[in-house]
Amino acid sequence: MLVVCAVIWLLAGLTALGILPMAGALPLDLYSFYSFASVCGWIAGNVFVRRRQRLGPTGHRWLALAYLIAPPSLLFLLRALATLEQQRSAPLVPAYGLVVYLIFFLVPVTLRQPAGRPRSQ
């Protein structure tokens, strides 16, 4: 997973620097981009909660770092694939997409039930 993440970050970085011109390869509108960011955050948050329960209290910091770095790389790559006109007209979209991802990631993480406590009805 980390190798794929590194490759995606590399592609997004090379595209942002203009070394690898991929602009216009995937003209994605903003609604679809933010929907993708929210779905990625929700899925990553739920998977993180399940994997954190299996690891216990010792290894969850590295796991959290992986879930906070890997999926947003897809968001930055998707935005780098947008047309140059779209990128110039809305330059803060990747930052807002990251905020949307983090909000939807933190919802399952903060609302998880502690182990051994039954849910109240």
Image (spheres, rainbow, N blue to C red):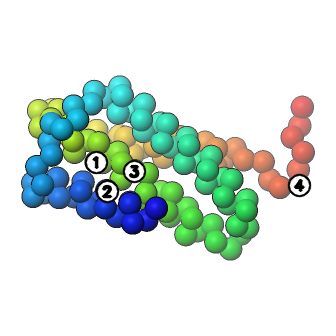
Give the side of residue 78 with respect to residue 16, left or right.
Answer: right
Give the percent coordinates (x, y) of residue 10.
26, 61
- Is 54 situated above or below 46? below
Mark 4 → mark 2, Cα distance in angstroms = 39 Å
Mark 2 → mark 3, Cα distance in angstroms = 10 Å
- The residue pinned by badge 4 equals 116
Q: Earlier in the sequence, mark 3 or mark 4?
A: 3
Q: Earlier in the sequence, mark 1 or mark 3?
A: 3
Q: Earlier in the sequence, mark 2 or mark 3?
A: 2
Asked if marks 4 and 2 touch (Cβ < 8 Å), the reply is no
Q: Residue at x 83, y 55 (%)?
A: 115
- The residue pinned by badge 2 equals 8
**Can residue 45 be seen in the rendering of this structure?**
yes
**Can residue 100 be seen in the rendering of this structure?**
no
Mark 1 → mark 3, Cα distance in angstroms = 9 Å
Residue type, numbered disc 2: Ile
- The residue pinned by badge 1 equals 77
Give the percent coordinates (x, y) of residue 67.
51, 57
Q: Residues within 10 Å of mark 3 (few under 14, many from 20)?
A: many
